[in-house]
Image (cartoon, grey):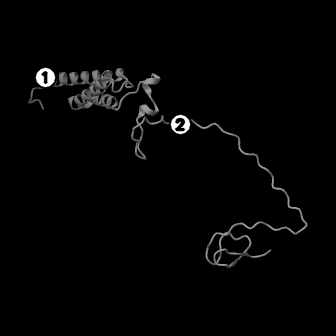
Amino acid sequence: MSDVKCPRCGGTNEPNAAFCGVCGTPLTAQPLQSPAGAASPAAPQVPPPPNLPQPPNAYPPLPPGAIPAPPGAYPQPSAIYPPAALGVKVTGQNTKWAIGLGIAALFCCGPFTSIPGIFLAKKDMDEFTSGRAPYLNEGSAKGAFYLNVIALVLSIIGIIFFWGRMGLHGF
């Protein structure tokens, strides 16, 4: 076989070299030359791939004049997964915190955790009532609200009972 000459610098290279050994220029593949009387075998014909259906867009198109979200930002949950349209109710983060605070208020912390729990549950109840978050589970928010109210009332009764039995000097 014959050596391949570089088109840029004229250096000689091996026939199967991808780059020039002198200057580094990419070398194009040289077609194999067959002897003068030999017939070259035909390359097998590969059929083109069938037209595959394209997947639907994950996000709806933006309305005219809308500014797209910056890269890495999460889209609004209602654009991807509209729970209210599917009839799914979600327990809000404020409600989850309110439930935890209500349980803590029942067992050890009393008004220190039940009062913030009341405000958090009320916040989710107001979001649902105003229509800003129709996907929230209003029943969970009401349950957390009443749990915290009951914990507050029981802790106040416990404090009054303790002070009444022992007085302020009962330690």
Q: Nearer the viewer, residue 129 or 140?
A: 129
Residue 59 location (% of width, % of height): 48, 36
Q: Which quadrant does the C terminus fall into?
A: top left
Tell me the residue at 79%/67% (across/down): 32
Residue 104 sits in quarter: top left
* Left or right: where 167 falls relative to 57: left
Q: Nearer the viewer, mark 2 or mark 1?
A: 2
Is residue 158 rendered to the left or right of residue 55?
A: left
Residue 62 at x, y = what percent?
44, 36
145 or 31: nearer the eye? 31
Q: Could you classify mark 2 by the number of other residues whose Cα lies within 10 Å: few (under 14), some (14-19), or many (20 or more)?
A: few
Vertical placement of residue 165 versus 18, above or below? above
Q: Which residue is mark 2?
A: 57
Numbered badge on residue 54:
none
Q: Earlier in the sequence, mark 2 or mark 1?
A: 2
Q: Secondary structure at mark 1?
A: helix
Tell me the kind of residue under disc 2.
Asn
Find numbered disc 2 in the image and state the secondary structure of the residue it sits on. loop
Quadrant location of the N terminus in the rendered image: bottom right
Q: Is residue 47 above or below residue 15?
A: above
Horizontal and vertical percent for residue 87?
A: 45, 22
User: As shown in the figure, which amino acid type bears the numbered disc 1?
Assistant: Arg
Residue contact between numbered discs 2 and 1, judged by CB atoms under 8 Å: no
At x 47% / y 24%, what residue is drawn?
Answer: 86
Residue at position x 8%, y 30% from top? 169
According to the picture, the residue beneath numbered tag 1 turns out to be 165
Task: Judge left or right: residue 46 versus residue 73.
Answer: right
